[in-house]
Image (tube, rainbow, N blue to C red):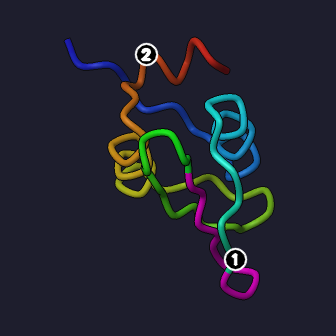
Amino acid sequence: MSPRFPAVTSDEVITILHKLGFRLKRQSGSSHAIYFRDRDRRRTNVPIHSGKIIKRKTFKSILSDIGLTIDEFDKLR
């Protein structure tokens, strides 16, 4: 059985990224931000839309970029 994707906002994703050691690298306008982690040189792009839920495909891409599974993300929440 495949785990369900949780409905998350950009604020929740950014909180988890900070817990994992990612920092804001740069922000392009007010629509998206790039987060970077020095120790393994991973980076990810997070869309910034206040209060809106991130689409499943975008969220899956973020999880892939940072090397987490859905279960690991839920545990960090």
**Mark 1 element type:** strand
Badge nearest the viewer, 2 or 1 = 1
User: What is the quadrant of the C terminus in the image?
Assistant: top right
Looking at the rendered structure, which numbered label has been put on residue 63?
Answer: none
| Residue at image location 71% in from the left, 60% down from the top | 24
- Give above or below for 20 relative to 43: above
Q: Position of residue 16 (x, y in %)?
A: 66, 33
Q: Is residue 10 above or below residue 46?
A: above
Answer yes or no: do the residues labelled 2 and 1 have beta carbons within 8 Å?
Answer: no
In this image, 60 relative to 16: left or right?
left
Q: Quadrant of residue 48?
A: bottom right
Magenta stretch bounds? 28-36
Q: Check if residue 58 falls in the magenta segment.
A: no
Please report the residue visible at 65 percent of the width from the left and 36 percent of the height from the top. Answer: 21
Name the residue: 80% across, 63% down.
50
Q: Position of residue 60 (x, y in %)?
A: 36, 45
Residue under circle 2?
71
Does residue 67 sit above or below 61 in this rendering? above
Q: Disc 2 marks which amino acid? A: Asp
Q: Which residue is mark 1?
A: 27
Q: Which quarter shows the N terminus?
A: top left
Return the x and y of residue 31 as percentages of the image width and height: 67, 79
Dot 1, crowdedness within 10 Å: few (<14), some or many (≥20)?
some
